Amino acid sequence: MVYRLDRQRIRKERAAMRKKGTVIRVLCLFFGVVVLGTVISRFTSSVLTPVVETEYASSGTIEHSIISDAVVTGSQEVPVYIPAGIRVEEICVTEGELVQEGDTLFRLNADELEETYLNKKIEHKSMKLQGSYPSEDARSLDELRIAKAEEELAYLEELVQKEGNVCAAFGGMVTEIRQQVGCAASDEAALVMGKEADQYTLKIHISDAEKNYVSTGDKATVQDGTVSATGTVTAIYKDTDGSGQYTVDVQVAGDSFQIGDSVLVNMVHTSNKYEYVIPLSAIRSDAASQYVLVAREKETLLGMELVAVKVQIKAETSNAEYAGADSDALSQKDKIIINSNKPLEAGDTVREK
């Protein structure tokens, strides 16, 4: 009887142990499946989740750089006149040419020059024969006329002695020729020359769009090989040739360069400070607005993950790399997504590179 009870007890204990083992195996299998699922999920996520590059939102300014070639022509432009009514037979220089003091600029018709000189001489004598004057103002006015006539006569006499050769009174560069060969000179300047001085003015031509990024007072780097100097934008004005372009005057010290030097001018304009300076690669747009995607943490079934969140911005001025922008929804703690290895939309889970 005792033996039978022991056998029954042993059978019950073995059955309980088998049941317990089954439960343990089921639990182990369950947790194994969970772990395997998690590993697979993590692996799949690591493969499929876009990898992004981010940059913190920060304030700053936008710099615009305009680079152009220029030639040092002189800061003081001096007009050169020749006696009106005399035909010009030869123009001896070209625009952009460097001339020395005494170099011939024009050759005038000798016969017309001689005739003009003699007529001016007679006119001058008759002016000096004037007797009494009705008032002191009339006397002063006549004296001024006589003085001007004497200057003209002296210049004509000098030209006659030089056989009609109009020579440069100083060294410099011919910046503009207004006279035509075979035509009689007028009262307007026949030629304009740039004169050596303590300051040189460089003339840079820019487009209407570029004009928005240049202001008087802006600094410019002027470079000729290894020689570099800092210039200042002194004037901006519209060209009169109908091209729609503008001319920028940049003044630079005269001891750095010489007339005729070819230089490279880099004008830099710095904008006002913006709340955010954002890489252009990060800025997106839809039918309604401009926006960026930022990587923000979010609680998910798999724990804390980074999610791409759409944040509206208002981009204003920009250069080739960055735009100045304002946004009420952006924070300087936000990480702006500037690049992704896969197509990316708002709401997507992402991983930082």
Image: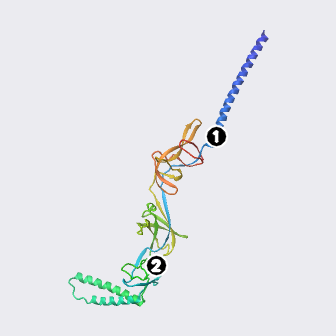
Instruction: Point out residue 83 in the picture as x, y percentages from the top left corner.
Output: 37, 84
Question: Is disc 2 placed on a helix, strand or loop?
Answer: strand
Residue 246 appears left or right of 345: left
Image coords of residue 6 (percent x, y): 77, 13
**In the rendering, which numbered label is found on residue 44?**
1
Instruction: Single out the residue that lies furthest toward the right.
Output: 3
Foreground pick, 195 / 318: 318
Q: Tell me which residue sits at (65%, 35%) in the image.
A: 37
Is 119 on the left or on the right of 243, as rendered? left
Q: How far apart are marks 2 and 1 (CA)?
A: 76 Å
Q: Earlier in the sequence, mark 2 or mark 1?
A: 1
Q: Quadrant of residue 79?
A: bottom left
| 145 on left or right of 95 | left
Q: In this view, does 352 lie above or below 144?
A: above
Residue toward you, 33 or 62: 33
Say left or right for 147 vs 25.
left
Q: Which residue is drawn at 24% across and 84% down?
A: 139
x, y percentage for residue 148? Answer: 32, 84
x then y, percent, for residue 340: 58, 48
Question: Amino acid type of disc 1?
Answer: Thr
> Does residue 80 sit above or below 271 in this rendering?
below
Most foreground residue, 338 or 271: 338
Give the amino acid type for the residue marked by disc 2 in the picture. Answer: Gly
Q: Name the residue under label 2.
A: 172
Q: Which residue is drawn at 47% across and 79% down?
A: 94
Q: Residues within 10 Å of mark 2 (few under 14, many from 20)?
A: many
Q: In the image, is residue 109 above or below residue 75?
A: below
Which image quadrant: the N terminus?
A: top right
